[in-house]
Image (cartoon, rainbow, N blue to C red):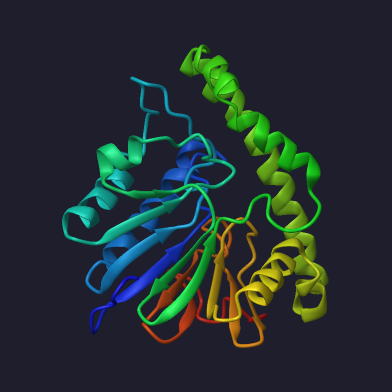
Amino acid sequence: MSTLPAGKAIYFTSDHHFGIPDRERSLQRELRFVRWLGQIAPDAHQLYIMGDLFDFWFEYRTVVPRGYALLFGALAEMVQNGIEVHYFRGNHDMWAFNYFEQELGFTMHRHPEFKTLGSKNFYLAHGDGLGPGDRGYKLLKKVFASPVNQWLFRQLHPDFSFRMALYWSRRSRYANIAREGMEDARGCYLDEQWLKAERLPRHAAAVVEQNPDTHFLVFGHWHLPVHLTFGQAHYYNIGDWISWFSYLRFDGNSVKHHAFETESNVFPHL
């Protein structure tokens, strides 16, 4: 259980995918995120990064990927100032092992968790591989989680391995952006029945059915900012820092969607 001091808040952010589409444009988004960290720092009690901070991350034993110095510095400063930073691994950073814990002071989470924040019960997860279907990805995730395969990948030179991995992850991300853009254009995600038929909301409904005292369910992974209700429980997809620059703020009673440095009417479908 985490007690929330008076005047403090808990923030949730997800799916920044730093590293794409190229270093210059990624840096612009990174600097925007660093500005946001500075804005929330005065009242932040905890920060939850719900996965996919990077479009690709792999930890060699003695090599750290180039870049992200300003980002790491801002996050480390938050930890040093007493703000807890929690990191839920996503599908693009499943190979984050212990660097963030040992060097930056994060608390790492590798599986979905129930947590009590303030007086509210939360279910927190990145979201990949949850819900019915998607068997191909679930099998692939097991392959990537294999210590043998991780060792084999580690034998590749970092210059080659990162170039190869970013090439494939960029293709995947662009395909998803195109899909989500079509959904936006059609307006289909305005339909609550359509939304609740998607994998993550179906998983959330099952969680609530088995755990009726759940108040909030928070996910990343799906890049649309979404808010649904299942009885007393409120379901949230955070959104991303590619198109929406969205985040959640929990004040001890309610969770609200916000966007940073964008128009106030950024979530017309919520």
Q: What residue is rendered at 43% in x and 80% in y?
A: 120
Instruction: Answer left or right for 7 relative to 146.
Output: left
Look at the image and tell me in which quarter the C terminus lies. Answer: bottom right
- Judge by depth and name the residue closer to the eye, 80 or 37: 80
Q: Give the percent coordinates (x, y) of residue 209.
A: 68, 76
* Residue 113 image point, x, y percent: 50, 60
- Side of 175 relative to 227 (left or right): right
Above or below, 200 against 71 in this view is: below
Residue furthest to the front in view is: 210
Where the N terminus falls, by quadrant? bottom left
Q: Which residue corresponds to the image point at 55% horizontal and 78% vertical from the top-left? A: 214
Residue 238 in sight here: no
Percent position (x, y) of residue 100? 34, 41
User: Height in image: 113 above or below 61?
Assistant: below
Residue for point 63% across, 60% down? 223
Residue 58: x and y in percent read 48, 30
Place residue 242 in its image quadrant: bottom right
Q: Nearer the viewer, residue 180 or 97?
A: 97
Numbered-mark total: 0
Q: Up-down: is 96 above or below 236?
A: above
| Residue 177 seen | yes
Left or right? Give the position of 31 relative to 210.
Answer: left
